[in-house]
Image (tube, helix red, strand yellow):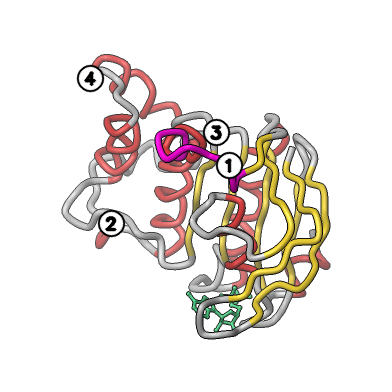
């Protein structure tokens, strides 16, 4: 569960990105963050992953006040959150398989575990037959699928996607949204930021 209590975020240059936000996101919810560019969506996401701290108010993740997190707790906390980005952020010299495997390597998983875990996740996102392809050989939608596979392979409780369809055409965007719905139905909390009202209305 994620709780915001009267949260404001004011950056060092004086820009107020969030003003007195209170909200609760429950386990298993599918939540859209909707607003134009500059509305504060990324700032809100950064507060959840503790990339930024609130200037005022409190952010709680599973009851834990993120302002009180010890430095060593932060990587453990982030491991429970999968992240998907507009610009994919894949490693371009690694195959789709290796990109997903990398997330498991960082989490300290053995080669045996990696070889067992990656194929079903690639299959789930629809890249079962493209495991050995490089990102440059994949379409935008396929690169986003690889990014989603990388984000869910560690079985996070929460998946956050920041403008995941910003670089995709409408049909591909819809396919990616259906994939998010599948992941959500399996129990993962989904937070998707978008400025695309049509997607939200259709969903
Ligand atoms: P969105 O994701 O909805 O486009 P952002 O959270 O990225 O919105 O930005 C909200 C506001 O905060 C914008 O005015 C942006 O310029 C400002 N902002 C974001 N990050 C920083 C930063 N690191 N330093 C200063 N201002 C920032």
- Mark in the foreground, 2 or 4: 4
Badge 2 element: helix
Sequence order check: which comes first, mark 1 or mark 2? 1
**Mark 1 lies on residue:** 68
Q: Is residue 69 above or below residue 191?
A: above
Q: Is residue 199 visible?
A: yes
Residue 8: horizontal and vertical position, in percent? 71, 68
Residue 94: horizontal and vertical position, in percent? 20, 48
**Mark 4 lies on residue:** 111
Q: Which mark is residue 135?
A: 2
Residue 99: horizontal and vertical position, in percent? 29, 44
Horizontal side of 56 relative to 80 (left or right) equals right
- Residue under the point 58% across and 85% down: 14
Quarter residue 10 falls in: bottom right
Quarter residue 186 falls in: top right
Q: Quadrant of ligand 1?
A: bottom right
In the picture, the quarter occupied by the C terminus is bottom right
Sequence order check: which comes first, mark 2 or mark 4? 4
Horizontal side of 159 relative to 75 (left or right) equals right
Please rate how many residues cluster around mark 4, counting C-alpha atoms within 10 Å: few if below 14, some from 14 to 19, many from 20: few
Quarter residue 18 falls in: bottom right
Q: Say whether marks 1 and 2 touch (CB < 8 Å).
A: no
Sequence order check: which comes first, mark 3 or mark 1? 1
Sequence order check: which comes first, mark 3 or mark 4? 4
Q: Say whether marks 3 and 1 touch (CB < 8 Å).
A: no
Whole-Å distance between the Cαs marked 1 and 2? Answer: 39 Å
- Residue 202 falls inside the magenta stretch: no
- Residue 69 falls inside the magenta stretch: yes
Q: Which mark is residue 28?
A: none
**Mark 3 lies on residue:** 156
Badge 1 element: helix
Whole-Å distance between the Cαs marked 3 and 1? Answer: 22 Å
């Amino acid at each position: 569960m994620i709780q915001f209590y009267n949260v404001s975020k004011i950056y060092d240059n004086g820009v107020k990105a969030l003003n007195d936000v209170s909200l609760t996101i429950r386990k298993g919810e599918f939540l859209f963050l909707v607003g134009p560019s500059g509305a504060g969506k990324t700032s809100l996401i950064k507060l959840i992953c503790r990339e930024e701290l609130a200037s005022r108010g409190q952010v709680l993740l599973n009851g834990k006040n993120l302002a009180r997190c010890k430095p060593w707790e932060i990587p453990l906390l982030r491991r429970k959150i999968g992240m998907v980005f507009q610009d994919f952020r894949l490693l371009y010299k690694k195959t789709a398989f290796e990109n997903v495997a990398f997330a498991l390597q960082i989490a300290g998983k053995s080669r045996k575990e990696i070889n067992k875990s990656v194929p079903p996740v690639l299959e789930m996102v629809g890249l079962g037959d493209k495991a050995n392809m490089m990102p440059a050989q994949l379409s935008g939608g396929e690169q986003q699928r690889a990014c989603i596979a990388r984000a869910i392979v560690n079985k996070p409780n929460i998946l956050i996607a920041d403008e995941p369809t910003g670089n995709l055409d409408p049909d591909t965007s819809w396919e990616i949204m259906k994939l998010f719905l599948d992941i959500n139905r399996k129990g993962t909390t989904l937070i998707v930021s978008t400025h695309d009202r049509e997607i939200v209305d259709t969903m």
